[in-house]
């Protein structure tokens, strides 16, 4: 299990997320005290090993059609999919760093606008 609490930085603001559950099947959930941010970490083993790291965010926003406030949410996550053998953690980290470096503001904005 990772250390408790976990820390993430959102728009230059550090967020502390405390452990709220540890699953039997290699999973943990960390949540900010106000529930705005959640970090989920899950792993599974099979023919291929897979790990998912996910940040969920929720907020209240005004619906532009009805002008009523509603809770909305968004999630961003990474999936690490790998064979049982043949890759070291360092080699997977090279791919993670490559994706992180590619995910510039310009590239993310383009993708969110529907470019591919």
Image (spheres, rainbow, N blue to C red):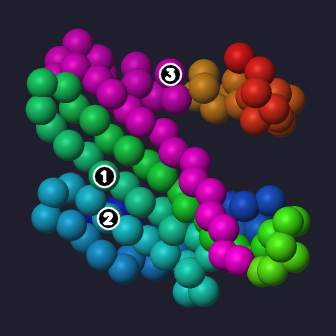
Which residue position holds label 2? 28
Which residue position holds label 3? 95
Question: Where is residue 115 drawn, in percent x and y?
Answer: 77, 21
Question: Where is residue 7 drawn, in percent x and y?
Answer: 57, 66
- Splitting the image into 4 quarters, where does residue 9 fall? bottom right
Q: Which residue is drawn at the image coordinates 49% and 75% (left, top)?
A: 31
Quarter of the figure that contains the C terminus = top right
Dot placed on the residue nearer the N-terminal end, 3 or 2: 2
Residue 72 makes an appearance in the image = yes
- Splitting the image into 4 quarters, where does residue 111 fall? top right
Identify the mark at residue 69; answer none if there is no mark: none
Q: In front here: 8 or 54?
A: 54
Label 3 neighbour load within 10 Å: few <14, some 14-19, many 20+: few
Alpha-carbon distance for marks 2 and 1? 7 Å
Label 2 neighbour load within 10 Å: few <14, some 14-19, many 20+: some
Q: Which stretch did the figure color magenta?
A: 70-96
For the residue labelled by badge 3, is the local secondary structure a helix, a strand or a loop? helix
Question: Where is residue 30 drawn, in percent x and y?
Answer: 43, 71
- Splitting the image into 4 quarters, where does residue 25 fall? bottom left
For the residue labelled by badge 2, is the local secondary structure a helix, a strand or a loop? strand
Count of picture labels? 3
Q: Are marks 3 and 1 in contact (CB under 8 Å)?
A: no
Label 1 neighbour load within 10 Å: few <14, some 14-19, many 20+: some
Dot placed on the residue nearer the N-terminal end, 3 or 1: 1
For the residue labelled by badge 1, is the local secondary structure a helix, a strand or a loop? strand
Identify the mark at residue 42; answer none if there is no mark: 1
Is residue 102 shown in magenta? no
Q: Which residue is drawn at the image coordinates 59% and 70% (left, top)?
A: 37
Q: Is residue 46 left or right of residue 28?
A: left
Q: Are marks 3 and 2 in contact (CB under 8 Å)?
A: no
| Figure check: 81 above or below 21 | above
């Amino acid at each position: 299990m990772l250390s408790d609490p976990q820390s993430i930085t959102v728009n230059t603001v550090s967020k502390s997320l405390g452990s709220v559950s540890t699953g039997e099947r290699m999973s943990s959930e960390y949540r900010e005290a106000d529930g705005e941010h959640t970090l989920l970490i899950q792993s599974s083993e099979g023919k291929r090993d897979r790990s998912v790291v996910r940040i969920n965010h929720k907020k209240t926003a005004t619906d532009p059609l009805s002008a009523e406030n509603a809770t909305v949410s968004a999630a961003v996550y990474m999936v690490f999919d790998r064979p049982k053998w043949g890759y070291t953690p360092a080699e997977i980290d090279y791919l993670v760093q490559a994706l992180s470096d590619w995910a510039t503001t310009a590239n993310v904005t383009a993708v969110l606008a529907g470019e591919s």
